[in-house]
Image (tube, helix red, strand yellow):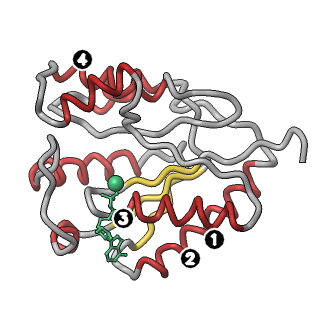
Amino acid sequence: MAGRRGALIVLEGVDRAGKSTQAGRLVAALSAAGRRAELLRFPERSTEIGKLLSSYLEKKSEVEDHSVHLLFSANRWEQVRLPLHSTFNQCLLSNFSLDWCKQPDVGLPKPDLVLFLQLRLADAARRGEFGQERYEDRAFQERALHCFQQLMGDETVNWKIVDASKSIEDVHEEILALSEDAIRAAAQRPLGELWK
Ligand code: ADP
Ligand code: MG
C-alpha cells in the first residue's frame, strides 16, 4: 500500500548464534510471501570505510579503539537510505562507557524489532571453531554477551529474546512470526530515531 513503510528488523547474538542463517531464511520467507525484503550486513565491507574495517578485522591493519568504534558507526550511517535501512549496535571494544559507545549511533533509524538470538557460549562452541578474525575469541564473546545484557535493559528499544539453541527450522518459525507482527505494527507508525 502506498505510503506504508516497512519494518527495520535486527538480528543480534554472539558469534555462531545463527544470525546469518536466520537472516537469510527470514528474507527468503518474506520474499516468498510476496513482501519486499532486503538483507543488510554490518559491517558492510564493500564501501571505502568498510574496506578499512575489513582490513582491521582480518588483522591486516591496526586502528586505534575509539577510531574503530567511530568507523563502525560511520559504516552504519553511510547505509542509511530512505525509507528504511540501518542497523543497531556493535558492542564495546574496550573499556569505554556504554554511553560513549552509544553516542555516534544516536539518531540512526531505530529498529522496529531487535531479535536477540540467545545461545550459551558452550553451545556456540559446538557449532564449530572460532574464525581467524579479530573479536572471534571466547574472551571477546563473553564481553559482547555482557554488553548485550546491558543494552537489553534499555526499554526504549524493542528487544525480543529468541532461544537460538532450538533447531534452525524452529528458530526460523519464531523469528518469522515476531517479524510479521513487527511489520504490521510498523505500518501504523513512523520510523523512530535511535536513542533520541
Ligand atoms: P552467526 O552469523 O550468528 O555467526 P551462522 O548463521 O553463521 O551464525 O551459524 C554458525 C554455524 O552454526 C553454521 O555452521 C550454521 O549452519 C550453524 N547453525 C545455525 N543455526 C543453528 C541451529 N539452530 N542449530 C544448529 N546449528 C546451527
Ligand atoms: Mg554471521
Mark pair 4, 2: CA separation: 39 Å
Give the Cα distance between marks 3 and 1: 17 Å
Is 152 on the left-hand or right-hand side of 172?
left
Between circles 3 and 1, the one closer to the viewer is 3
Q: Amino acid at mark 3?
A: Gly
* Residue occupying the far right of the picture: 2
Report which residue position mark 3 lands on. 18
Q: Identify the secondary structure beneath mark 3.
A: loop
* Residue 29, image x, y percentages: 63, 67
Q: CA distance from mark 4 to mark 3?
A: 29 Å
Q: Residues within 10 Å of mark 2 (few under 14, many from 20)?
A: some
Precedes in sequence: disc 4 or disc 3: 3
- Which residue does the numbered mark 2 point to in the structure image? 173
Q: Amino acid at mark 4?
A: Ser
Per the image, label 1 sits on a secondary structure element best described as helix
Indicate the position of residue 54 as horizontal and vertical percent values.
Answer: 26, 32
| Front-most of residues 7 and 159 | 7
